[in-house]
Image (cartoon, helix red, strand yellow):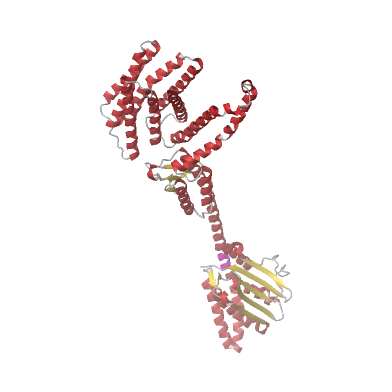
Amino acid sequence: MSKYLYLTWDLLYFFNALLFTLVAFHKRRTSWGGWAYGALIVTCAILYFDKIALELGRALLHRDIAVLRAVLQVAGLAIPSMLACLFYANESGHVAWRGVWKAVLWLLCAGGAAGTVLVIDGRAEWLRIALSDSLAALAGACGCGLLSLSRRDRRNSLDRNQRRWLIAICGALVFLCILDVVACPVWLGMAVDALPLCFLLVVTYYVERFTFFDILIKKGAFVFCSYVLLTLYFVFVPPRLLPWTNRTLSSSWFGTFVWSASVWPVVLLAPWGHRKLSAWLDRLWLGRRFAPAEAGKYFMAGLEGAIDTRELVERAGTHLSAIFQSHGEVRLDCSAEPGCDGIRAPIRSGDLVVGTMLVRPRPHNIRFLSEDAALLSSLAEIFSFLLENLRLREKRLAQEQRERELILNANRSELKALRAQINPHFLFNALNTIAGLIPRSPERAERTIEQLAEVFRYTLRRSDREWVRLEDELAAVRAYLDIEQTRFRERLRVAVSSSDSARNWRIPAMTVQTLVENAVKHGVAEIKGPAVVEVQAEVAGAKLRVEVRDNGPGFPQATGRGSHGFTGGFGLRNIRERLAGHFGGEARLEIGRDDGQGMTVVRLEMPEVKV
């Protein structure tokens, strides 16, 4: 029984040395105890490594190494005063009778110095042991007193639980030291060595949840499991690996090679085992749904489809909640509550902090650890990248929209200027026609005046409006063509038609009117014989198609059906730019020639618009 007890004791030395060393090298100052806690952790790490070295010296040299024993004894005398200083540093602002507590601390420090003198002297070993037990009991009693009498506000249940556990550990230390004086059972030393580990677990669980808990649970568990497995391997595998070889062969280089090769798969599987153990602990203990890499992919995939900043923020909050199993939110006004628990990460744009990514505390007091904080920081970087791209895209779209508006405003001004240029010439010709009709056909002259008034009324009413119904535009076109038909008499034949589905479509004002005026100006007026102007509007697929045809000579360079070599004059360019501003590449204006019928064709196509 004692053999297994001492083996367990040695395993406890190793585990304590490992964990205290990991914590000491990772972070030496905490929010609970400050530097006093770090000094205590480093001293405990030295103590347990010294115990392991001392046991190895006994096993190999069959004697104690004096220097190692002296270091062990001095560290054991220093730890009680460090423990008392730690409790006082944390609770000094919340207790009364500070002078009494300082006197106790000075007494512990003096006792540790006296014990160190006894270690150097090498005599009165019994006095040093009694002094060491007395100092440990006094330090435990000091810790119980400070924690029990502290007036610190402990509204948080976690703080209350931490105080209870620390009082229990200090009380156990006092009890074990008293028991060591009355009786000295074999298990007492192992129980005393287990108390620092309990103390470390309590402090890291309740205070340093962001960093230490990951180290103790994950790295500690992995190293402990690997140590146990390797121990079992070397106990059971090598003696049975080469049963056919004799002692000489087994001790030769060949036997060493075979044993090394046999343990190599175990070494190669260590990273895989660490990942599996970490993932298992994440799911079992921490309730994590995603590994860090999976969480990053899930987060980015969920945010890629956002079309604006508001949607991006909403999606980020939803996916944060799913990843961390708690309420997550993104604030772009840098207004996170200063006293808010949970974890947070800054959202940066270049060197500037433009927001905060925040995850609220989990239900049932499940702690966030350092990996959670690191994962949130990486997700904040992903969010910052997507936010920057989205804002650049929004800025580019806003700039394009402003450019379109400027083009449309300029085209409206050009359209008014065009009307000012065309209307006087048209008015002069119409008035001459009316003057000629008055003597011989006053009724026709009167109707022409009414049509002229309708054309100018439509022009003035629609000059400041961008959208009109196609039916209203075609009514003005008919009035205009009637006037021109009166002017050219039987030489001009016109036809205006539209399908029922096309009449209520919205089009930019004065577009068809401008096309018809161009047909009269460049077609009818340029030929001597009979002239034809046809206007046809229909819905083809999801677009409105308007064709204006005339049998004039056509535009220069507009040869061949569907030709795009000629873009037209001022009026056609104005229409084309207005269409591009409203519809981009979805609308088009084509100028071509139908050589089979001898007609110039101007075709306008545009999608439906809701205004």
Q: Which residues are magenta?
A: 411-416
In the image, residue 424 sits, relative to residue 579, either above or below, namely: below
Is 62 magenta? The answer is: no
Q: Nearer the viewer, residue 566 or 378?
A: 378
In the image, residue 136 sits, relative to residue 158, either above or below, namely: above
Q: Is residue 359 left or right of residue 575?
A: left
Q: Position of residue 420 (x, y in %)?
A: 57, 70
Picture quadrant where residue 165 is located = top left
Q: Residue furthest left?
A: 97
In the image, residue 30 sits, relative to residue 593, either above or below, namely: above
Q: Position of residue 66 (x, y in %)?
A: 45, 13
Picture quadrant where residue 251 is located = top right
Q: Nearer the viewer, residue 72 or 598?
A: 72
Q: Main secondary structure of the magenta part?
A: helix
- The residue that appears at 47% across and 35% down in the rendered structure is 218
Picture quadrant where residue 245 is located = top right
Q: Nearer the viewer, residue 43 or 608?
A: 43
The mark total stands at: 0
In the image, residue 450 sits, relative to residue 42, either above or below, namely: below
Q: From the image, which quarter does the N terminus lie in?
A: top left
- The residue that appears at 48% across and 46% down in the rendered structure is 289
Is 412 magenta? The answer is: yes
Can the viewer see residue 341 in this picture?
A: no
Q: Position of residue 93 (x, y in %)?
A: 30, 30
Q: Nearer the viewer, residue 10 or 471?
A: 10
Can the viewer see residue 166 in this picture?
A: yes
Q: Residue furthest bottom?
A: 440
Q: Position of residue 586 (x, y in %)?
A: 60, 64
